[in-house]
Amino acid sequence: MRMVRGGIGTPEFAANKTTTKEKHMATYTAGTPTQFAGPVADGDYRLAVIGAEEKTSSSGNSMIALKHEIIGPVGGKDLPESGRPHVYDNLVFTPNAFWKIDQFRAAIGEDVVEGQEVDIEADALLGATLTAHVTLGKNEKTGKDRNEIGAYLW
């Protein structure tokens, strides 16, 4: 192994300073390095449900807020486990949005029977895997790119 002398924080580095001001070394707490960050391009992806929470929508309807981890593209290689992007979606329990709940249930492998009344518990969705068409959208508050669910696929 070759040793490099004179790097930041070494006596050689300090001796070569041309200023008389005292310098303090910057510090940080290291995390786990990631190989992937940011939103993915539009396409069909395999997802895992890693968060599901029962909430009330801004209009007062029951909903389940979902957090999906993007595993990788359909027919492609998995993304590295550290740094996989997330995509969020809401299942709102109102007649105008039942179609989306039907799509989601079909995508996770449940039988969807027309006219059947179904109770869904958020915790029961954790760990489910599915396929969805993911699109690239904009966060309305920050203006930054983010992924969105275009459609659940089965």
Image (cartoon, rainbow, N blue to C red):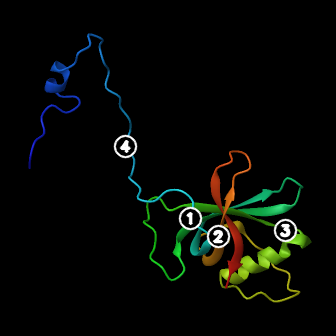
Residue furthest front in the image: 18
Q: Position of residue 104 (x, y in %)?
A: 72, 76
Which amino acid type is marked by label 4?
A: Ala
**Which residue is at 35% across, 28% downward?**
26
> Sequence order check: which comes first, mark 4 or mark 3?
4
**Crowding near pointer 2: few (<14 within 10 Å), some, many (20+)?**
many
How far from the left and from the top, in percent, is residue 87?
63, 62
Q: How many marks?
A: 4
Q: CA distance from mark 3 to mark 2?
A: 22 Å
The answer to which of marks 4 and 1 sits earlier in the sequence is: 4
Q: Residues within 10 Å of mark 3 (few under 14, many from 20)?
A: some
Q: Which residue is mark 2?
A: 134
Whether residue 53 is visible here, answered yes or no, is yes
Circles 2 and 4: CB atoms closer than 8 Å: no
Q: Tell us which disc is closer to us: 2 or 4.
A: 2
Q: Which residue is mark 4?
A: 30
**Which residue corresponds to mark 3?**
93
Structural distance between the alpha carbons of marks 2 and 4: 32 Å
Earlier in the chain: of badge 2 and badge 1, it is 1
Specify the quadrant that holds the C terminus. bottom right
Element carrying mark 1: loop
